[in-house]
Image: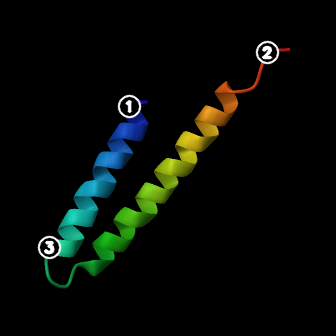
Amino acid sequence: MSLFLLLLLVALVLGVIGLTVAGLFHLFVVGIVVLVADLVLAGVLIGRRGRPAR
């Protein structure tokens, strides 16, 4: 859970810096990529927990 929150925070910081500082739009794109990777990671972790034990 802490990895999810850390990646979410990094994505938000990179996105804000990328949008506010002129010429750093690539940081915004990197922030979006980190956010998508974070959501995929969360989906995989939730999917693993959702299976019933055999």
Residue highlighted by disc 1: 2
Q: CA distance from mark 2 to mark 3?
A: 48 Å
**Residue at the spot x=23%, y=57% of the render?**
13
Whether label 2 touches label 3, CB < 8 Å: no
Residue highlighted by disc 2: 53
Residue highlighted by disc 3: 20
Q: Position of residue 47 (x, y in %)?
A: 67, 35
Whether label 1 touches label 3, CB < 8 Å: no
The colour scheme is rainbow
Q: Position of residue 30 (x, y in %)?
A: 37, 68
Mark 2, mark 1: which one is toward the viewer?
Answer: 2
**Residue at the spot x=37%, y=73% of the render?**
29
Say whether disc 2 or disc 3 marks the residue closer to the N-terminus.
Answer: 3
Quadrant position of residue 20: bottom left
Mark 1, mark 3: which one is toward the viewer?
Answer: 3
Residue kind at label 1, given as amino acid type: Ser
Q: Secondary structure at mark 2?
A: loop
For label 3, count other residues whose C-alpha is less than 10 Å away and answer few (under 14), some (14-19) or many (20+). Answer: few
Residue kind at label 2, given as amino acid type: Ala
Check the picture and name the quadrant holding the N terminus.
top left
Q: Secondary structure at mark 1?
A: helix
Q: CA distance from mark 1 to mark 3?
A: 27 Å
* Foreground pick, 3 / 16: 16
Is 36 above or below relative to 38? below
Q: CA distance from mark 2 to mark 1?
A: 25 Å
Say whether disc 2 or disc 1 marks the residue closer to the N-terminus.
Answer: 1
